[in-house]
Image: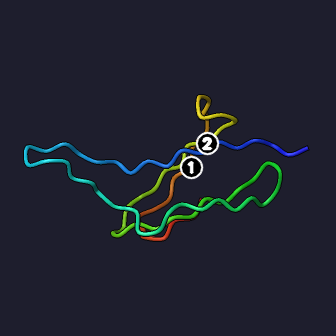
Amino acid sequence: MAGTLAVRLLIYCLPLLTGLVCVAALAEAPTVQLTSATNAIIRWSTDVPTSGRVRYGTALTNLTESARSEQRTRHAL
């Protein structure tokens, strides 16, 4: 029986007096590689080195787990 995986990837932006400034922009859209019914690898790239965070769970309203990457431009969690 196949499992269900919900993932949310956020790029954080900071509101400044001069406007909205994003720490990093996506250089490559996220992709999901299912490795089994209960495991997946999320990959994405950013234009500048930044740490990444993926929140995941069984539904978008139930993202109870998270994983983080170190400062880099190519991320895989």
Assign the N terminus to one quadrant of the image: top right
Residue at 41 percent of width and 69 percent of height: 27
Residue at 59 percent of width and 29 percent of height: 61
Kindly report the distance in space between the C-alpha atoms of the residues bearing marks 1 and 2.
8 Å
> Do the numbered discs 1 and 2 sit on residues whose CB atoms are within 8 Å?
yes
Which is more foreground, mark 1 or mark 2?
A: 2
Relative to 17, is 5 on the left or the right?
Answer: right
Relative to 25, is 33 on the left or the right?
Answer: right
Above or below — where is 59 with respect to 24?
A: above
Report x, y in % for residue 42.
61, 59
Report x, y in % for residue 70.
46, 62
Q: Secondary structure at mark 1?
A: strand
Q: Secondary structure at mark 2?
A: strand
Q: Which residue is mark 1?
A: 67
Q: Quadrant of residue 57?
A: top right
Report x, y in % for residue 30.
54, 60
Q: Earlier in the sequence, mark 1 or mark 2?
A: 2
Residue that lies at the very extreme toward the left in this rendered image: 17
Look at label 1 and name its amino acid: Ala
- Give whichever of 48, 27 is nearer the camera: 27
How was this image coloured?
rainbow
Residue at 65 percent of width and 34 percent of height: 59
Relative to 34, is 70 on the left or the right?
Answer: left
Assign the C terminus to one quadrant of the image: bottom right
Q: Residues within 10 Å of mark 1 (few under 14, many from 20)?
A: few
Report x, y in % for residue 46.
40, 66
Residue that lies at the very extreme toward the top in this rendered image: 61
Q: Quadrant of residue 41?
A: bottom right
Residue at 55 percent of width and 43 percent of height: 55
Q: Which residue is mark 2?
A: 56
Look at label 2 and name its amino acid: Tyr
